[in-house]
Amino acid sequence: MQQVDQLLIGGTVLTMNEALDVYEPGAVAVQDDHIVAVGSMNGITAAYEASETVDCTGQIIMPGIVNGHTHLSMALMRGLSDDLRLDVWLMGYIMPAERAFVDEEFVYLGAKLAAAELIMCGTTSFADMYYYEAEVARAAAEVGLRGICSQTILKFPAPDAESYEQSMAYAENFIQEWKGHPLIIPAIAPHAPYTNTDDMLQQCAEIAKKYDVPLHIHVSETRQEVEDSRDNYGMPPVPRIKKLGILDHKCLCAHCVHVDSGEIRTLRNHGAGVLHNPTSNLKLASGIAPIQEMLEHGVNVAIATDGSASNNDLDMFTEIHLAALLAKVATNDPTAVPAKQALLMATRIGAQACHIGDITGSLEAGKRADIIIIDIRNVHNTPTYRHDPDSVYAQVVYAAKSTDVKHVMCNGQWLMRDRQLLTINLDELLERSQAIANRIDDFIREYSSNIMSKLISVASFQQQESFEIQLKARFNETERIEVLLNHDDVSIVKHSHYRQYDTYFLFNDPDDARVRYREDDFIGENGEVTGVRSRLTYTLPTKEREFDKAILLSHSQFYAPADRPLRFYREYFKAAEEREIHKERLRWQILYKGVQFYINLDTILHPESKNKYLEVKSRTWSLSDAEYKASLATEIISTILNIDEQDRVAFEYVDSATSSPHPSRPETT
Ligand SMILES: [Zn+2]
């Protein structure tokens, strides 16, 4: 009799090996960190004797589950914001919170909270991607989980690096420090093709090769990402990263929702693993990845949860279940991705996708002892059928729940027995996690109510404090503008024609700040649109005073190009009120008696108005200058254009704009 540390006996053993051997009743012998033997109960108990024997009667013994893609520390942001589009969710909540809170302690605590959840849901291996990845590695190593820990590389400043060079240095250091650890595989993670330059992607590929470590990246998650890649690089993300060498060495590609058959073949030919995140893709409405086609082509696909901020949990039982169902609805074929296949993606094939298939993912002699035991002696798992050998897989995938996981062993060490965590003090962990959440809650409350801080985080603003004089009047006999333009004292510097679509966001804000989203269509000589420009303007209410029948205005304004669609700003700002006004603007920059004026001749297109308006404006810098320019503007209005005193008006267009719950113009994004 050979002596071993542990014998797990009496359960249904799903080996998930190449032959998909099932032993019922079966047994597994474990010594130190690895599996010594797997087989029928009689065979194993006849050959081995152990210091500890666990009776698994009525239970399923199977490999620990592999979670192919996650951001563990985001467990602390679970429920921070939900039911939003990816850009609003990221820019409006996740990134500001990350900038303010993510430090080493946060990452460590979040990873520990996530680790507790992983274990309780039967996961023993994960592939993570985050900042301060050494802290994720430290937390996982302490609790005894197996992890591919990938340090994020971004072209923007990140919580753990002010520059990309800094994050590269961190990554290299981290890899050198952790390489060879029994549980942790350090890796490099250029976050995504669109958040890295070509040079950076190439450098990441070189590091992966130099240190022989995996490379983890988000690829083709949304349709927009693919369209942008075509626009910016002339090709979708997969051929781009192939060209840059990313796929050459142990690559893990998260998502791959929008890939075609050619790209699938590219991934297969390079041995890249695809990490399929059903809940995250559904919740963010990214789409359904063509998993069935990938599997038919022989791509290794892992199932994954993604981070808890977009899921909102790390329960792989839900993901396996969904992966099996989604493939059916996506192909209109109920035989697509049967339960056995789904469970393989969460075990052996998933491990292969993560390039750890040689050490885990199946119960085989020589592999690490990553084992879970699922109790099926409960109401939702009863009864049990066995006439079809595959029904045991269906039981795990379609009926069992993560709470049925009873014992968890990783690398030969028990992490959970009878649902009690053995390497984590759960009460303390929960308390500390809630304390951080309370601080983030306060921060988000403050952040959301401060329009300026919200603006700054999505646009690069230039401040412009300006003073100007402005005269405005109803002016319906527009042909009379010729009198001004042909006047002896007037020379025209520049003429332009726009169509302006303004959306004002108004807030219940003590400063009464406003944000205007303006889309200018430049109109050519034949009425065609020759160009489009979108800008955001932040304005505090105009301070004004009557000044020699003109109005002196002082603005405090911030301008920025609006590089996102109106829809984004609408969902991002959540204004108390939205107003819309569209107008046709003929604009002349003139010199009158040598002084520069802007003449705007505006036809209001929406809301409909019978009146047209003339604006005479000039920048000014001193009271005496304002006085002089106001007198000249009055000459233009009264003497040259003969506009009656009673036609003078003193309102801003925003005041006459209508509240608009819905955009009346289709968006051009
Ligand atoms: Zn992700």
Image: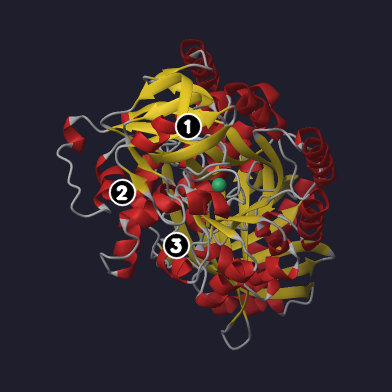
According to the image, label 3 marks what residue? 289
- Give the secondary structure at mark 3: loop
What amino acid does circle 3 point to?
Ala
According to the image, label 2 marks what residue? 393
What amino acid does circle 1 point to?
Ala
Depth order, front residue of 538/407:
407
According to the image, label 1 marks what residue? 29
Q: Position of residue 340 (x, y in %)?
A: 35, 54
Q: Quadrant of residue 73?
A: top right
Q: Is residue 301 above or below residue 407?
A: below
Q: Do we see residue 339 in this rendering? A: yes
Give how far apart the Cα atoms at labels 3 and 1 are: 38 Å
Q: Position of residue 337 (x, y in %)?
A: 35, 61
Direction front: furthest residue: 1
Q: Is the residue marked by circle 1 packed among few (<14), some (14-19), or many (20+) residues within 10 Å?
A: many
The residue that appears at 45% across and 32% down in the rendered structure is: 47
Depth order, front residue of 118/513:
118
Q: Is residue 102 above or below residue 328?
A: above
Give how far apart the Cα atoms at labels 2 and 3 are: 23 Å
